[in-house]
Amino acid sequence: MAEPLISVRNVKKYFDVGGGKTLKAVDGISFDIYPGETFGLVGESGCGKSTAGRTIIRLYEPSGGQVLFNGKSVYDLSSREMQEVRKDFQMIFQDPYASLNPRMTVEDIIAEPLDIHKAYKSHAERHNRVIELLKLVGLNEEHASRFPHEFSGGQRQRIGIARALALNPKFIVCDEPISALDVSIQAQVVNLLKELQEEMGITYLFIAHDLSMVRYISDRVGVMYLGHMMELAKSEELYENPIHPYTKALLSAIPIPDPEVQRSRHRIMLEGDVPSPIDPADTCRFVDRCPYAIEQCKGKAPEFTEIVKDHYVACHRAKDILEGKAKPTK
Amino acid sequence: MEKLLEVKDLAVSFQTFFGEVEAVRGVSFHVNKGETVALVGESGCGKSVTASSIMQLLPMPPAFYKRGQILFEGEDIVQKSEKEMQKIRGNKISMIFQDPMTSLNPTMRIGNQIVEGLIKHQKLSKTEAEKKAIEMLNLVSVPQPEKRIRQYPHEFSGGMRQRAMIALAMVSNPELLIADEPTTALDVTVQAQILDLMKQIQDKLGTSIILITHDLGVVADMCDRVIVMYGGQLMEEGTVYEIFKNPKHPYTRKLLGSVPRLDMSRSEMLHSIEGTPPDLYKPPKGCPFYDRCDEAMIICKDHMPQRDYHTDTHYSCCWLNHPMAKGVAEGSEA
């Protein structure tokens, strides 16, 4: 395979929540993202997937670890050098209502990255670039002078995408870009993201909790739980042969829109809720809810290892589960 | 089967500064005893307004019933006074909302919120009511209910709050439960727990459920019948198998085609529906889906089609059913 565009190495992000307590939102994750691919990051709310996305592009200052972008260590750059690199990193946000300034026209919103990086010589050049971007995302010239409130959710998300594309970035973090939209509109936006990727060769980190959408859009998928990466594999492999007990439970919980299939499925019901990420124990994060947990799991957290080729799992019992030797203990 | 609820030609509008917004434009359906009916559609299609008007929960004004009847156990809810409604709400018909944080009272202990309805409707004493509340929390699998009833909503997690909401809704053993996007705000593993719980309670108590949702996976999992709504009108209705296996209306087919399925190849494109739903401030005269429909004909623009029954339980409102049209291609394109 080609050289990775982004290498994430043991990245950590802790938040001080007062009283000497630490919230370990992201606690040492490592993976590579290759040029032109879509890397999906899934997990339930509070698992740290959004924090991970933001820490990787250094919107949050990391608590530890390293990110290599084209061989450069992103966390070691000065703020001036960082400004240069930022041209290559963009972000698309979840809420198309909150992420566009209601007092700015669409033209000014889309041109803001151009303004900041002084990426044009004349006003006409700026205007033409905005029109070009609007057309690229399926809007048109007359939309440029309007304000965000005049648009529907799907159209606003297109404006957000146009803004992200303004500087021809190499890497875009899409943080739940479709979860605020209706299903029919979701499909429009996802198809647009796919088309843009094919045309411009952009690399995506696609963060979402909708697992069927993530499978559809991603080449490889990582599953997070309480700040740890639990499993990582090619998207078909992960969905067809999940190894980690958490991934298995997560996948079996997604209802399939087909009554015959759905009603004959076996569901793995997880007990209870996701535990608190404040000062978590140094064991496997899933041990309390895991149906396969044994004594060993209450000890040190398992290493993130390659069990099958290109299929990484952090579980003490991964081998047993793979060979069908492990039986649920609960 | 016995009909518990029958909605006949219901139309609900909102009087706004700009004029009348016709949110619901003549819908008719029924709910039998003990069954689960799904009301599916995109935001703004009128599904929540329909549900809220069954409970008379809409602020009036600006909302008003334009025409139609809502017959619940043979009596018309539209004609009821506020005082009569108070005897029905939370007693015979209950509702679960999407966001449990905003629909529970943050300043009241969970126990008191559950007990309130019991004391009012069933005239129980405080200790009896409290015992019942603990029983109820136990039924919805809230651990340590004796301790939990003394806590406030902010001390509960999202899933636990939704369980408390269900306990609150089910405590007086209602005939009809309206669940408005009950799991949309929850994670999939918690969603699975809550849906499972709703099924168990329904089996135990024989409650009818109207489930409002846009998640077709949840519909396939939970429901007996499906009603598809668009632009304030009903487009298609049928059993869950008829709708998923043999959808007749172009909108239903598009809707089913726009969700990715776990068993779908990644190279397939999603069938997106171009455009946006109609503005109900000036509702279209003909079929509301006309603008976005690939198979639209001239007649669709100005004339709303009738219900055409394909089986006893399955109808769709589309001109393509007419013998003069070329006919809808069989099966789903999804």
Image (spheres, coloured by chain):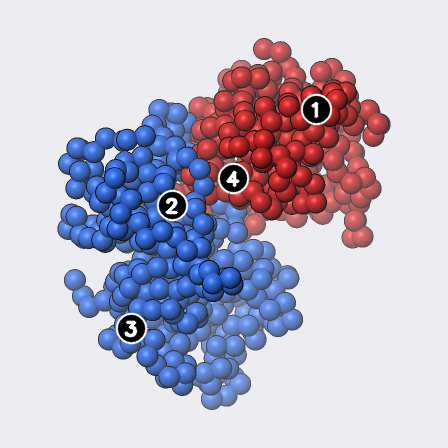
Q: Number of marks in the image?
A: 4
Element type where label 3 sits in the image: strand
* Nearest-to-viewer mark from 1 and 3: 1
On-image quarter of the N terminus of chain A = bottom left
The single residue placed furthest to the front in the displayed view is A20
Chain B shown in which color?
A: red
| Residue at horizontal 35 percent and vertical 59 percent from the top | A27
Q: Are marks 1 and 2 on the same chain?
A: no
> Up-down: is A252 above or below B209?
below
Q: Amino acid at mark 4?
A: Gly
Disc 4 crowd, CA 10 A, few/some/many (<14, 14-19, 20+): many
The answer to whether marks 4 and 1 mark residues whose Cβ atoms lie closer than 8 Å is no
Please rate how many residues cluster around mark 3, counting C-alpha atoms within 10 Å: few if below 14, some from 14 to 19, many from 20: many
Q: Position of residue A177 (x, y in %)?
A: 46, 56
Circle 4 residue: B159
Can you tell which chain is drawn blue?
Answer: A
Residue under pointer 1: B127
Residue assigned mark 2? A211
Q: Chain of mark 1?
A: B
Marked residue nearer the N-terminal end (4 or 1): 1
Where does label 3 land, which residue? A69
- Horizontal relation, residue B334 to residue B21: left or right: left
Label 1 amino acid? Thr
Are discs 2 and 3 located on one and the same chain? yes
